Image (cartoon, helix red, strand yellow):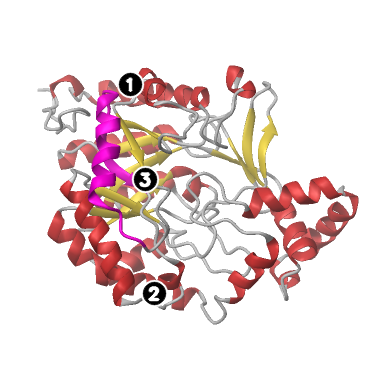
Amino acid sequence: MIQTMRWFGPADPVSLSHIRQAGATEVVTALHDIPNGHVWPRDAIAARRRMIEAAGLGWSVVESLPVHDAIKRGEMTDALVQAYGDSLRHLAAEGVRTVTYNFMPLLDWTRTDLDWALPDGATALRFEWEAVAAYDIHILRRPGAEADYSDAIRRRAAARFAAMTAEERHRLERTIIAGLPGSEESFDSPAFLRAIQSYAGVDAERLRANHVAFLRAVCPIAEEVGITLVVHPDDPPFPIFGLPRVVSTADDLEHLYAAVPSPANGLCFCTGSFGARPDNDLPAMVRRFGERIDFLHLRAVAWEAQERSFHEAEHLGGDARMAEVLRAVVEISHAQGRAIAMRPDHGHRMMDDLHRQANPGYSLLGRMRGLAELRGLERGIVHMLGLDRSSAREDHPVSGRAAWEMTE
């Protein structure tokens, strides 16, 4: 695998130097200052590349080039398609070969606690369905919200809300809708409610159709310039706030690739997002969609007893079956003669990082620990399978994008 870390640009508290020292050979990044629907200028992309390469790192994966919500609602215009296509052309001209996006309405990834205490003193990100219900029903007051939760969750959410202080209610609201790192939008509750209402009539079937229409418009451009578009799965992988989610299961992926078989229609396989559903068999999904996977987010979540609730576990722990996932990745990489870019995702906040500023989920030490564990696991699997990692041919100037060869 090509070892990368996410970097949020010059304002990121984690420096490029630290990322390189952690063992990554590339970063994945984006021009987060450019509004959705606008063209990424080639000179801005080139300036970002020069900054990255001056630190001794490579950049071949963008995360993310956002899809405007108008497209997700089915209001795609020639201007929006032109802007997206021009950005792809500019990225390709600067050497980017993989572009990540998602098709989640309004919110990107969502959590309810950004510093959930772990037994060892570190903290983790957590998603709690009861907390979502408390916000949705009692703070947001979305019409009809009660119907989306079980009787038990509604009762617990009401009791929880009644016991919360004003500060606790405000913190929950901001955690859910203020915008986490890499998110495309940030809201307050009145604006969020209006935005939800703009999706009236967009059910799962309509959202799927809008996704297909978008890909049919932009995949020919991506094919032309040599870019693979990789969709990030829904996080969490089920409907939330009355909004549909359509990239959550193997069946969702099967529908997407049958509808748009273009080689530019790829997958960012996130073990944490897919892994938040116990009915998703992660190793089987890697094998089933291996030809589509061009980027990996490797993290593990631990399912909790409460329905639809989970927290971020250590990278080799939780319920991800990471060893089986990585064995499938190694075997696919060898069979296809390519190395797949990966990054450790959502590390714990630990040790000195507990006292330093960091983007939630993107502190340095937790991700460095995860990268080291994943690197060791990959090397162990390569050795166990008899694959000669050191003989891989390098055809990428910085990262060592590699073909795999079998040791005779």
Tell me the magenta residue range: 38-63
Asked if labels 3 and 1 touch by Cβ distance under 8 angstroms, the answer is no
Q: How many residues crowd around disc 2 within 10 Å: few (fewer than 14), some, or many (20 or more)?
A: many
The question of residue 39 being in magenta is answered with yes
Examine the image and state in which quarter residue 101 appears: bottom left
Residue 210, numbered label: 2
- Who comes first in sequence, dot 3 or dot 2? 3
Name the kind of residue labelled 2 in the image.
Asn
Compute the Cα span from label 1 to label 3: 32 Å
Q: Nearer the viewer, mark 1 or mark 3?
A: 3
Q: How many residues crowd around disc 3 within 10 Å: few (fewer than 14), some, or many (20 or more)?
A: many
Instruction: Work out whether residue 344 can be spotted.
Output: yes
Instruction: Work out whether residue 1 can be spotted.
Output: no
Q: Which residue is mark 1?
A: 380
Residue 271 in picture, x, y percent from top left: 45, 43
Residue 30, numbered label: 3
